[in-house]
Image (cartoon, grey):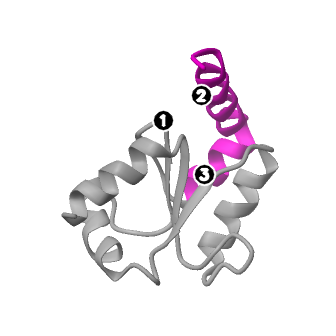
């Protein structure tokens, strides 16, 4: 499968998706660890892709997303941003709102 199609499929199939370095249980960078903590504080499950184990995604996603760094948070097919944006959104209540609204939307469509 073409790497761009693979990325698009991952984003499409996962309501909340974090592209990160490492795993939620063992982040490999401080920024990824902070992003995991912020998402965990929202209380919803999320999918992740360890870009350190997926070199093709690590190389191509920044071009696809027009976002140069990791982590990258995608919610409902849209790029939310990286660590500083995720933390800012958590602090001002936006992260919880966007995640709960998105989860509710999908639960109501089931």
Graded by Cα atoms within 10 Å as few (under 14), some (14 to 19) or many (20 or more), the crowding at tag 1 reads some
Q: Nearer the viewer, mark 3 or mark 1?
A: 1
Please name the residue that numbered disc 3 is placed on. 86
Quarter of the image holding residue 27?
bottom right
- The structure residue drawn at horizontal position 69% and vertical position 69%, both measured from the top left corner, is 24
Please name the residue that numbered disc 1 is placed on. 76
User: Of label 1 and label 2, which has the lower sequence position?
Assistant: 1
Residue, far left: 2
Vertical comparison of 90 with 58: above or below = above
Front position in the image: 17 or 96: 17
Q: Position of residue 62 (x, y in %)?
A: 30, 65
Q: CA distance from mark 3 to mark 2?
A: 16 Å
Q: Position of residue 104 (x, y in %)?
A: 67, 22
- Disc 1, disc 2: CB below 8 Å? yes
Classify the position of the C terminus by image quarter: top right
User: Of label 3 and label 2, which has the lower sequence position?
Assistant: 3
Q: Nearer the viewer, mark 3 or mark 2?
A: 2
Q: Position of residue 80 (x, y in %)?
A: 48, 45
What range is drawn magenta here?
84-110
Q: Secondary structure at mark 2?
A: helix
Q: CA distance from mark 3 to mark 1?
A: 15 Å
User: Of label 3 and label 1, which has the lower sequence position?
Assistant: 1
Graded by Cα atoms within 10 Å as few (under 14), some (14 to 19) or many (20 or more), the crowding at tag 2 reads some
Residue 66 visible in image:
no
Q: Which mark is residue 41?
A: none
Please name the residue that numbered disc 2 is placed on. 102
Q: Position of residue 41 (x, y in %)?
A: 81, 50
Magenta span contains residue 91: yes
Graded by Cα atoms within 10 Å as few (under 14), some (14 to 19) or many (20 or more), the crowding at tag 3 reads many
Q: Secondary structure at mark 1?
A: loop
- The structure residue drawn at horizontal position 40% and vertical position 78%, both measured from the top left corner, is 54
- The structure residue drawn at horizontal position 75% and vertical position 61%, both measured from the top left corner, is 37
């Amino acid at each position: 499968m073409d790497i761009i199609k693979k990325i698009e499929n991952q984003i499409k199939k996962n309501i909340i998706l974090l592209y990160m370095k490492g795993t939620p249980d063992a982040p490999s960078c401080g920024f990824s660890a902070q992003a995991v903590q912020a998402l965990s504080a929202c209380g919803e499950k999320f999918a992740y892709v360890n870009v350190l184990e997926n070199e093709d995604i690590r190389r191509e996603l920044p071009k696809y997303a027009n976002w140069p760094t990791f982590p990258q948070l995608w919610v409902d097919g849209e790029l939310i941003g990286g660590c500083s944006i995720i933390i800012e959104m958590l602090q001002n209540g936006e992260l919880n709102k966007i995640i709960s609204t998105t989860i509710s939307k999908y639960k109501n469509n089931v």
